Image (spheres, rainbow, N blue to C red):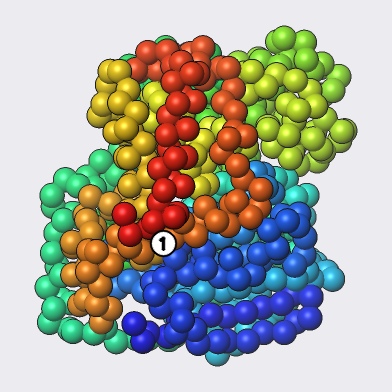
Amino acid sequence: MTRDVKVLYIDLTTGKMSRKLRPDLAEYLGGAGIATKLLQEEILPQEDALDPRQPIILATGPLAMIYPSVTKTVAMFKSPLTGELGESHAGMRLAMAMRLAGVDAIVITGKSESPCYLSISDQFVGIKNAEPLWGFSVEEVGRSLRELEPGSGHRSCIRIGPAGEKQVSFACVNVDTFRHFGRLGLGAVFGSKMLKAIVITGAHDELVGDRPKYNAIYQELYEKCVRTGAMEKYHELGTPVNIKPLSAMGGLPTLNLQTGTFDQADAISGEAFAEEKLIRKIACPGCPVGCIHVALSRRFFGEGYEVESATVSYDYELIFALGSFIGISDKDAILRLIEDVELYGMDAISSGIILGWVTEAYEKGLISEEVLGTKVAFGAVEGYRTVLRNLVRQPNQFYRDLARGLAYAVKIYGGADFAAVLGGNEMPGYHTGYGSVVGFTVAARHSHLDNAGYSYDQSNVGPVDIEKLTDYLIEEEQIRCALNSLVVCLFARKVYDLETTARALDAAGIPMTVEDLEALGRRIFILKLQIRQSMGFDLRQMTIPKRFFETPTLNGKLDRATADRIMERYLEKVEQLVVNPAN
């Protein structure tokens, strides 16, 4: 490949900036591929995640905005939550804006002396004063920057809230209001660099390769997206369509994972939200599907029917984490909690899992009302709002510890047995079997989106086949590494099989075969593993909390010895792959 990869380097300490052409990165394609390679080049693996020298990598793919549903940007960093690989993906306008600015990747290092934000276009890169914005909520800083910066309609504004400024280990970065770099604490890394926001726009354009071939494959992909049913559920009810079936199967984490069934699942289902709260659907630029579901949250205050309202996006993971997991069955209460974490700039999943643990720890007497500053109980929203507020304000040592994540807090306060955390990351919304529990534990970023073990469980109900499961987890993660180098939205993974993806790349002037894509996926998978190991990751040291074996899954209760055997076999196969990647 002779394609140039355009990388923008920014050092916040010195103010030095440079644009470099990196043809050597073309073999990594884009997105997760070049982000992983750039992270390997820049990372200080043994230093703290919040060390000013640590990099933030943002990368989009060569097909972004060229084909439907190729809309994501990948962020890579060292996670302050897990101490290992930080990787997060976000949609909305960021991939579009980076292409308009003429950059494939951005590498940010150093630390500003005072709060700043970056203004980036194809003509200009500047470090600007953000002192007046420091302390602002996510919504406030977004509104201010939209007034200050040009490029409306072609602009992306990504920013942190107070949680990122206070370096909460699960602080997120908001992307254009309705999407996020959510998991693993990128917001804290922004805050550690005194970086409040990045605004990107431009007018750069590019020509695709073979225009007739491109037009034909574009139309084919568009038809698959909108007319085959492959992505239908994401537009109609969105991911909340999973609430009722997962609860019925026993796979919906509820009441701090004390059960997998929520008796009020109907009240918080995708159907219930759509019928009572949905006001519009939004699509990322370049996507014809429109999967972002936005609700109206209305609240009365004072006499005389005084009312305030807010628009809040919702999806399955938010409803699970701030609904069933903490016993909330009132849609307005869930939307209020979502709004709170949005304004503070915290990951909603981690926030909900922490609230669940706090509730049970409070019930068991591990933490007191005096320490919490409130009473908490499953289903009681106001106590939870106080805890969320205190996670940002950090009024005492307990909250300072809790703000470092659940895995850190249980080492000090106990309650590790009922902490729903795997690999240092608070669990996603699936308790389906060995595929989910082991899959989250071994995955590169301890996410359900790495290897889809939860999906394997639902398709393979019954006694576990260790060989089949471990092969699936490894192969699926490699395929997703390839797709995440484009960067395809994983909602479109059924549209972008490897054969179709190879044809799409060829039409865009990037000749690759299915075998090339498979080799790329393996290469990225191995490179991620090597980076994680350099940071100290050791699968042999991973432990799964007792709660995961106490609460039945849709495949029944899990056995620790079996889970250990699966992880041992997984490790054996991965080690063989590293030694001989061709096989």
Looking at the picture, tell me which residue is in the foreground, 379 or 306: 379
Question: What's the residue at 83%, 69% (across, down)?
Answer: 114
In the rendered image of this protein, does residue 413 appear above or below residue 203? Answer: above
Question: What's the residue at 60%, 71% (across, down)?
Answer: 41
Q: Would residue 443 be seen by someone viewing this image from the given angle?
A: yes
Considering the image in quadrants, where does the N terminus appear?
bottom left
Spot occupied by residue 463 in the image (x, y as percentages of width and height): 30, 18
Spot occupied by residue 348 in the image (x, y as percentages of width and height): 57, 39
Spot occupied by residue 170 in the image (x, y as percentages of width and height): 65, 44
Quarter of the image where one finds residue 525:
bottom left
Residue furthest bottom in the image: 123
Looking at the picture, tell me which residue is in the foreground, 245 or 527: 527
Residue furthest top in the image: 364
In the rendered image of this protein, does residue 200 appear above or below residue 583? Answer: below
Q: Residues within 10 Å of mark 1 (few under 14, many from 20)?
A: many
Looking at the picture, tell me which residue is in the foreground, 510 or 398: 510
In the rendered image of this protein, does residue 477 appear above or below residue 422? Answer: below
Looking at the picture, tell me which residue is in the foreground, 141 or 370: 370
Spot occupied by residue 68 in the image (x, y as percentages of width and height): 27, 64
Secondary-structure class at tag 1: helix
In the rendered image of this protein, does residue 265 appear above or below residue 363? Answer: below
Question: What's the residue at 52%, 52% (across, down)?
Answer: 529
Image label count? 1
Quarter of the image where one finds residue 301:
top right
Q: Residue at label 1?
A: 523
For the residue marked with disc 1, what is the amino acid? Answer: Arg
Considering the image in quadrants, where does the C terminus appear?
bottom left
Q: Is residue 346 left or right of residue 87?
A: right
Question: What's the residue at 57%, 86% (across, down)?
Answer: 19
Q: Would residue 450 be seen by someone viewing this image from the given angle?
A: no
